[in-house]
Amino acid sequence: MTATVDASAATDSTGRNRKANLIAFAVMALLVAIAPFVAYPFFVMQALCFALFACAFNLLIGYVNLLSLGHAMFLGLASYVCAHAAKVWGLEPVSAILVGTVASAALGLIVGALAIRSSGIYFAMITVAFSQMVYFFCVEAPFTHGEDGIQGVPQGLALGLFSLSNPWILYVFVAIVFLFGFLAIQRIVNSPFGEILKAIRENEPRVISLGYRATLYKLAAFTLSAAFAGLAGATKAIVAQNASLTDVAFAMSGEVVLMTLVGGMGTFYGPVVGAVIVVSMQNYLAQFGEWVTVIQGVVFVACVLAFRRGIVGELAARAKVTL
């Protein structure tokens, strides 16, 4: 009798979670569709790129409990490689973005293979070290043009058909990339592979005792996270038509942590909300200059104190659903 009741409760919970996620996705898709009509399209496209970046970071920290403090190296490297491929090699935008994404995935595989041998603060420090190495590589490498960055990146014809110089076509393109990345990450987390990642987060020794090679799963998660971060960075290079040191700097790694924690770590929609909040503050509070950083700090502290699980995390907990 008890088993039947538990099974019924689990079924109801699953159905409620599915319905909540369908509603949340529909609302998000609707907001993405109407956003360029109520806000500056370039700002919205930047927000979508950073939202995808935050989702990629959340895949690692939210579901594997690995804190990378150097994740900007994947965003920045993909941005530089994509910009170089489009401007110098003459690749069309989709191909250039794919090249940048592959470059970040390859870097993620190399860094992950070395970093996951450690855990906790040691893992975080190793990612910081690699991030600084990539930063100084971008400063010194000839193709990055040092502090000037790569300017005037051509937007070209996506797939040889769609002119991304048209701001509306460009917006639709960015929205498709974001939704693709978001749904791909959601599918990964909800797959058997994702269930093992969550089990590693909760109790890694038990997962190992069951015969799973936790190290390989963590390496796969790290590489996937790097790839999606690279997808965000490469898309941003096409949108902004430049690649600069800002995208690979340590401050960017700190910002993605802020986005994820404010929105809700371990939730699908939290990083998106957090990214929109942080990018909005940077855009609409730019008149305050360096004080924007102080304001961000105050908001971060307030959110940590008032919303321990992040904005979306608290809302989901009160509604008793998983978002």
Image (cartoon, rainbow, N blue to C red):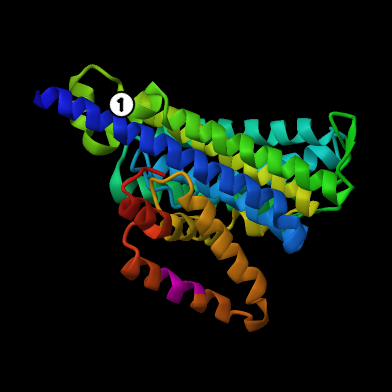
Nearer to the camera, 107 or 79: 79
Picture coordinates of residue 178 (x, y %)?
Answer: 64, 42
Figure check: 153 above or below 111:
below
Residue at image point 77% right, 47% down: 171
Q: Secondary structure at mark 1?
A: helix
Query: Of the residues shown, which amino acid type is indicated by label 1?
Result: Ala
Q: Residue furthest top?
A: 211
- Is residue 98 found left or right of 104 in the rendered image? right
Instruction: State the image quarter where residue 89 is shown.
Output: top right
Is 73 on the left-hand or right-hand side of 95?
left
Name of the residue lying farthest toward the left: 1
Q: Quadrant of the N terminus?
A: top left
Write the residue at 58% across / 48% down. Answer: 28
Q: Is residue 297 magenta?
A: yes
The boundaries of the magenta stretch are 296-300
Residue depicted at 63% across the width and 83% down the height? 288
